[in-house]
Amino acid sequence: MERALAMESKEKDSTAAWKNKVKRRRERIKAECEKLRRFVNEEEQRLLQRLEEEESETLRSLEANVAQLSRQSSSLRTLISEIKEKSRQTPAELLKDVKRTLDRCCIFPFPHPVHSCLGCGRHIHVEELG
């Protein structure tokens, strides 16, 4: 009988020890998961911030390209109008004004616009695409 009581006591001690071990393991798992949740939240915020900055930079670049293209279109429309007007002149009048017209054409710089590569985060000059 004593032996049975001793075995029962030993099993109760083993059960209590196992429960404590499981409790400590559960607490470690919860702590690790909480640490991972904080890491994932911080990483999400960092990535969202980086995406927002990239979006702003790309939009600024695209808006600058639109403005540049608009200026170029306006300059081209002006030149086309002048050329149409010149085409109505007599050959003699046209020859008198050729040098001034050519000089004026050279003052309109038409740099190639820069396109943003939305997926790669870099800028590509139009001549690189051709």
Image (tube, rainbow, N blue to C red):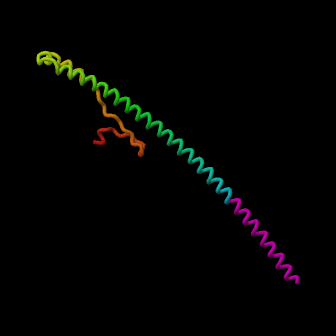
Residue 90 lies in quadrant: top left
Does 124 sit left or right of 32 as displayed?
left
Which residue reaches farthest bottom? 1
Does 78 sit left or right of 12 as displayed?
left
Vertical side of 82 occupied by 42: above or below: below
Question: Which residue is rendered at x = 75% and y = 69% of the image?
Answer: 18
In front here: 56 or 23?
56
Residue 125 lies in quadrant: top left
Task: Give how far across and how far down residue 96 sits, in percent.
Answer: 14, 16
Question: Which residue is rendered at x = 59% and y = 47% of the image?
Answer: 42
Task: Give how far across and how far down residue 78 sits, in percent.
Answer: 27, 22
* Quarter in which the C terminus is drawn: top left
Question: Which residue is rendered at x = 88% and y = 82% of the image?
Answer: 2
* Quarter in which the N terminus is drawn: bottom right
Which segment is the magenta one?
1-28
Task: Give how far across and how far down residue 36 sits, in percent.
Answer: 62, 54
**Magenta segment, principal secondary structure?**
helix
Vertical side of 70 occupied by 93: above or below: above
Task: Give how far across and how far down residue 93 sits, in percent.
Answer: 14, 15
Count of numbered circles in the view? 0
Vertical side of 129 occupied by 1: above or below: below
Residue 108 lies in quadrant: top left
Residue 17 in the magenta stretch? The answer is: yes
Residue 65 in the magenta stretch? The answer is: no
Which residue reaches farthest right? 1
In front here: 11 or 88?
88
Which residue reaches farthest front? 88
